[in-house]
Amino acid sequence: MKREETGQYITISTVGEKCKAFVPAPLPPKPDLQIKGDLRALLDQTLLALGRLDSTTLLLPDTDIFLYLYVRKEAVLSSQIEGTQSSLSELLLFEMGGTPGSSLDDVQEVSNYVAAMNHGLRLLKNGLPLSVRLMREMHKVLLSRGRGSDKQPGQFRKSQNWIGGTRPGNASFVPPPPDRVAECMGQLEKFLHNIPVKYPTLLKAAVAHIQFETIHPFLDGNGRVGRLLITVLLCAEGILKEPMLYLSLFFKTHRQRYYNLLQQIRQDGDWEIWIEFFLTGVKQTADKATTTCSNLINLAQEDRNRIHKIGRAASSGLRVHNALLRRPIISIARICEITGLWTTSAANAVGHLEKIGMIKEITGAKRNRLYSYVDYVEILNKGTEVAAI
């Protein structure tokens, strides 16, 4: 047993009963991780996969366009893990002022995630280091509106929480008591800043994610912030130039294995089996992201070639297509705003794109109609279907 090296259980009294809360030991793990043999080979393969993904982003005609959609895809997946029923199409519809089919609270929650991710990356680019402050800033935005807004956004919890069960006494896991949270998070921040030792970035991301989830510092939103932490760390340390890697789909697909490993580390300190799981997820996700980027690039070029063949409307059609790349669910008014086309020209071009099956009207309404770039949305939608949870 390595329990003494991963943390300690302390007896606490909360909500009228006694239970044992787990306080994790400071990182890095002791004894140090054993990264050798097959695990070392997997680490090397994962770094190569991330390098390929980073290179692919350089081929993108407009990185911001792809990031706009990638961040939203991750927001949907990460929120689905927490139980929301929103899809990517519904989020895009909501952002265009349409009425989503699922709960408005669900879509608002996903929209908040997008805002939290963008806020964290913006702070990072403006010089704020990856820190407790940055995590609290993201959390504040995450819970700023809708469900969870009464759960102390941006503040560490002041009461005991637990995971699984109806009360702490029958919970599957009880995180540290509230008076230990600031101390634990301070220790995590030191580790992120390479104190007492510099850790390879991927291994740092793997163990820091576990530590954050174990501390569970907030009343709500811990899972989402913990997943954001991975991507933000990879960007902060230059492994990725752009935030193009998200593990929520992998965690969602292997949900029970993920939860079992979290508990296994706390019980016996088998960090290496978690590292293998984590690296496998990063490699698979990076490979899929590279493929998705390539598919989107190819689709965009193929559709530009199709538009060139529609005759005199090709020029305005290409401008509409560029707008669709930015907003794959869009209105005529928004097309005009992005392209500078007159309403009649935009509507005429949209009609041509409908005829060749590139876009589809999705509201069925006579006014305030919205159009979807069908194949583009379909490529991005893979894995986000609610039924796949």
Image (cartoon, rainbow, N blue to C red):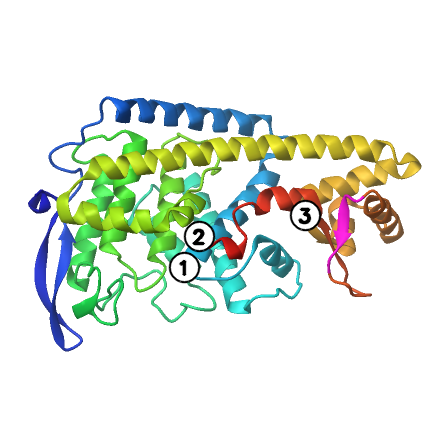
Q: Is residue 318 above or below residue 59?
A: below
Whether residue 342 sits left or right of residue 110 in the image: it is right
Task: Work out how far the residue at label 1 is from the one at label 2, CA to CA, in angstroms.
Answer: 7 Å
For the residue marked with disc 2, what is the amino acid?
Ser
Residue corresponding to mark 2: 78
Residue at 88% from the left image edge and 36% from the top image edge: 310
User: Where does the N terminus fall, quadrant-wise?
Assistant: top left
Residue furthest out toward the bottom:
16
- Where is mark 1, residue-wise? 82
Range of the magenta residues? 357-362
Q: CA distance from mark 1 to mark 3?
A: 26 Å
From the viewer's perspective, is 330 left or right of 30?
right
Q: Which mark is residue 91?
A: none
Q: Is residue 148 visible?
A: yes
Q: From the viewer's perspective, is residue 295 above or below residue 102?
A: above
Three-letter amino acid code at the position of disc 1: Glu
Q: Which residue is mark 3?
A: 328
Q: Is residue 193 visible?
A: no
Q: Quadrant of residue 285?
A: top left
Closer to the observer: label 1 or label 3? 1
**Mark 1–mark 2 CB contact (< 8 Å):** yes
Residue 331 in the magenta stretch? The answer is: no
Which quadrant holds residue 245?
top left
Badge 1 density bin: few <14, some 14–19, many ≥20, Cα 10 Å = few
Q: Name which of mark 2 and mark 3 comes first in the sequence.
A: 2
Percent position of residue 78, x then y: 44, 52
Q: Residue at x 22, y 51 (%)?
A: 263
Q: Report the amino acid beneath label 3.
A: Pro
